[in-house]
């Protein structure tokens, strides 16, 4: 598997990552980095009842090897563009 350097910003609790989700994709995972440092994440879940947000948190938790409870969507809960905060880590 190819290693991906995920662009991030530091926050007072850890780091933040800007993401653009692609719900209802045929596969799930990081699908690339856009030129404006936004991480594209493919999701198989539909954007219904928080399923896509839950899957995004699962994917980031597995990728970054952190607990789900350390990941919070701080902006864009109902949008394709989101800002996610991961607490307790310094770098990705």
Image (cartoon, rainbow, N blue to C red):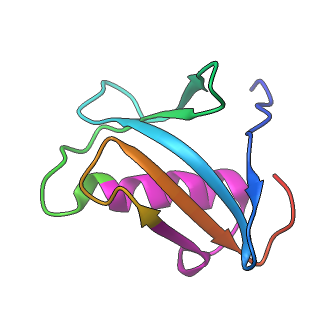
Asked whether 38 or 24 is in front, the reply is 38
Q: Would residue 58 appear left or right of 36 to someone viewing this image?
A: left
Asked whether 27 or 54 is in front, the reply is 54
* 35 shown above or below 13: above
Where residue 28 appears, as percent x and y from the top left, is: 43, 35
Where residue 3 appears, as percent x and y from the top left, is: 80, 30
Asked whether 24 or 16 is in front, the reply is 16
Judged from this view, the residue extending furthest toward the left is 48
**Residue at point 61%, 77% (across, down):** 70
What range is drawn magenta here?
53-73
- What secondary structure prevails in the magenta region? helix
Judged from this view, the residue extending furthest toward the right is 90
Q: Is residue 3 magenta?
A: no
The quadrant in which residue 32 appears is: top right
* 29 shown above or below 54: above
**Residue at point 51%, 42% (across, down):** 19
Where residue 92 appears, as percent x and y from the top left, is: 81, 52
Q: Would residue 26 appear left or right of 92 to someone viewing this image?
A: left
Q: Would residue 67 appear left or right of 8 to someone viewing this image?
A: left
**Residue at point 69%, 69% (across, down):** 66
Q: Quadrant of the N terminus?
A: top right
Where residue 12 appears, as percent x and y from the top left, is: 75, 78
Judged from this view, the residue extending furthest toward the top is 35
Asked whether 26 or 31 is in front, the reply is 31
**Residue at point 13%, 63% (across, down):** 49
* 52 shown above or below 11: above
């Amino acid at each position: 598997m190819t290693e991906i350097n995920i662009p991030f910003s530091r926050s007072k609790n850890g780091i933040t990552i800007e993401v653009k989700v692609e719900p209802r994709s045929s596969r799930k995972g990081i699908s690339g980095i856009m030129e404006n440092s936004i991480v594209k994440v493919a999701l198989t879940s539909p954007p219904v009842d928080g399923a896509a947000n839950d899957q995004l948190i699962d994917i980031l938790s597995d990728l970054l090897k952190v607990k789900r409870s350390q990941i919070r969507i701080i902006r864009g809960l109902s949008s394709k563009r989101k800002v996610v905060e991961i607490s307790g880590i310094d770098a990705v």
